[in-house]
Image: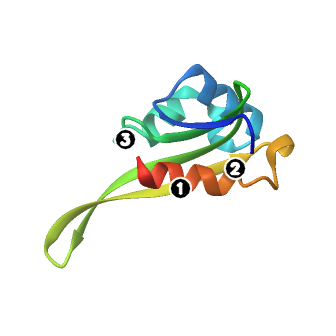
Amino acid sequence: MSGLSISIEAISEDSLAAYSASGMQRGEVGQKALDWTFRQNAKPFAVARLEGEVVGLSAYIRSHLNLSGRPAIALQAVDSFVFDKARGKGVFTALAKAYEQH
C-alpha cells in the first residue's frame, strides 16, 4: 500500500484519538485505562499511518512467564483495529509483522 508507514510507539495523542474513534471500550474510558493496561510496556503500539493519518493500531501487553523453570517475557496483542478506509489492504498483517520485528 503506497504511502503506508508503521511505527512502534508509546501512548500518545494519536493513539488516544485512534482508540476513541475505534469504539472499543478501552478507548472510551481514555488514557487512565490505557496507562493501566500498558504500564509494563514502554512502547505498546504498532501504529499505521497513511499520508500522516492514523488508519490502524495494534496494542500489546507485556507478560512475565515461567517456561520450564526459566523466566520469559511474552507480548500479547490485545487490541487491534484498522479503520474502514484502509481495510482489505494488508494493514492488519503489516502491523503484526512490524511489532514482531521491532
User: Vertically, is 39 above or below 95?
Assistant: above
> Could you say which is closer to the camera, residue 55 or residue 65?
55
Observer-side mark, 3 or 1, equals: 1
Asked if residue 23 lies left or right of residue 74, the reply is: right
Split into 4 quadrants, where in the image is the N terminus?
top right
User: Vertically, is 14 above or below 79?
Assistant: above
Amino acid on which the number 2 mark rests in the picture: Val
Amino acid on which the number 1 mark rests in the picture: Lys
Colour treatment of the image: rainbow
Residue 11 location in percent, x, y? 50, 29
Which residue is identified by label 3?
41
Q: Residue at x 45, y 30 (%)?
A: 10
Asked if residue 101 lies left or right of residue 40, the reply is: right
**Structural distance between the alpha carbons of marks 3 and 1:** 18 Å
> Could you say which is closer to the camera, residue 58 or residue 27?
58
> Few, some or many C-alpha atoms within 10 Å of disc 3 (few <14, some 14-19, many ≥20)?
some
Which residue is identified by label 1?
97
Amino acid on which the number 3 mark rests in the picture: Asn
Which element type, helix, strand or loop, lies under badge 1? helix
Residue 32 location in percent, x, y? 51, 29
- Mark before the other along the chain sequence, 3 or 2: 3
**Structural distance between the alpha carbons of marks 3 and 2:** 22 Å
Residue 55 location in percent, x, y? 73, 37
Which residue is identified by label 2?
91
**In which image quadrant can residue 26 be found?**
top right
Asked if residue 25 lies left or right of residue 65, the reply is: right
Q: Residue at x 59, y 20 (%)?
A: 13
Q: Residue at x 46, y 58 (%)?
A: 76
Do labels 3 and 1 touch, CB within 8 Å?
A: no
- Mark before the other along the chain sequence, 3 or 1: 3
